[in-house]
Image (cartoon, grey):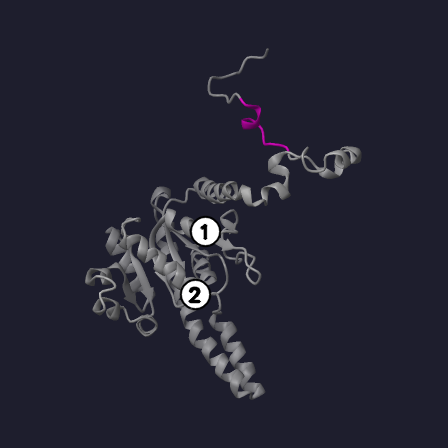
Amino acid sequence: MDAMTSLHDRTLAEDLTPLEVPDPARESPAADLQQPDAYRLAFADPEFMARREARGIRFQLELLKPDLGQEAHGIEHTVVVYGSARFTDMDTAQERLAQAQMDGDAEQIRLAERHVRNAVRYEHARAFARLVGEHSQRQPQDQRIYICTGGGPGIMEAANRGAFDAGADNVGLNILLPHEQQGNRYITPGLSFKFHYFALRKMHFMMRAKALVAFPGGFGTMDELFEVLTLVQTTKSKPVPIVLFDSAFWKKAFNFELLVEEGMISPQDLALFHMVDTPEEAWKIITDFYQIAP
């Protein structure tokens, strides 16, 4: 019997070398006919892994893989940016407006003008993330703060892009959807993760979050924002800066004071978040909270 070379060596062979997943194309056809499913290794059997009874295992894997991936890159502190997936950058929005004006279609002009207004929000998200990225690049590895988004288009792309502009690593936690299945091109390779379960994705948003910045968005943005507010309100999460970007939008979308007046939240709950209108204001909220130089 060969002795292990060190007490630190792992005993199990599968811990020493990567597990080999068999290639079905090279397996014996006769064996396949005799036992097409039962003879597969459990983790290499997609039908088995997709069963309802294996859902708990899939939860664990979806929790573990992005965690280990970020740990390997030294990602410990993030600023999570939420917002609509439907916004474009200013250049694209202006091109659409110019084309609509050339066509002379009043409805298309109206929609293109809305794209331009929303593109301002895209550019603000990009500028904010660039501030975070530039700061991070000046810090030691263990003190860096990384931009993390849902990995899709719109505001998410803008934030990843801003960090990319600064030369900073950034994270994308994409969700498998019929119309939004790829991470945007500005996410750092190796830090673009795809999720099936919204719940696990939202947990990953919070696991490393040191601040959250919510730009205008739809149902998904509202879902993510109010879950965070609830977690902090109920002390399931430690207090972190929660920043609502574009105060006019948020005041029009929600009458938070009404919730206080009707006794649905406490007056002090209004201090759980801050409304801002510039990238610099948003970043200052975060740097003041942690007493770090911007």
Q: Position of residue 259 (x, y in %)?
A: 26, 67
Q: Main secondary structure of the magenta part?
A: loop
**Image location of residue 16, percent across then percent down:** 55, 26
Span colored in magenta: 12-20
Total numbered labels placed on residues in the image: 2
Query: Could you tell whether 146 is left or right of 15 in the image?
Result: left
From where the camera sits, is residue 248 visible?
A: yes
What percent of the width, then of the height, locates residue 206? 37, 50
Left or right, 200 with respect to 267, comes to right
The kind of residue tagged 2 is Phe
| Residue identifier under label 2 | 219
**Marks 2 and 1, how far apart at CA:** 16 Å
Q: Which secondary structure, mark 2? A: helix
Question: Is residue 18 on the magenta stretch?
Answer: yes
Disc 1 is placed on an element classified as: helix
In this picture, residue 17 sits left or right of residue 270: right
Q: Which residue is mark 1?
A: 201
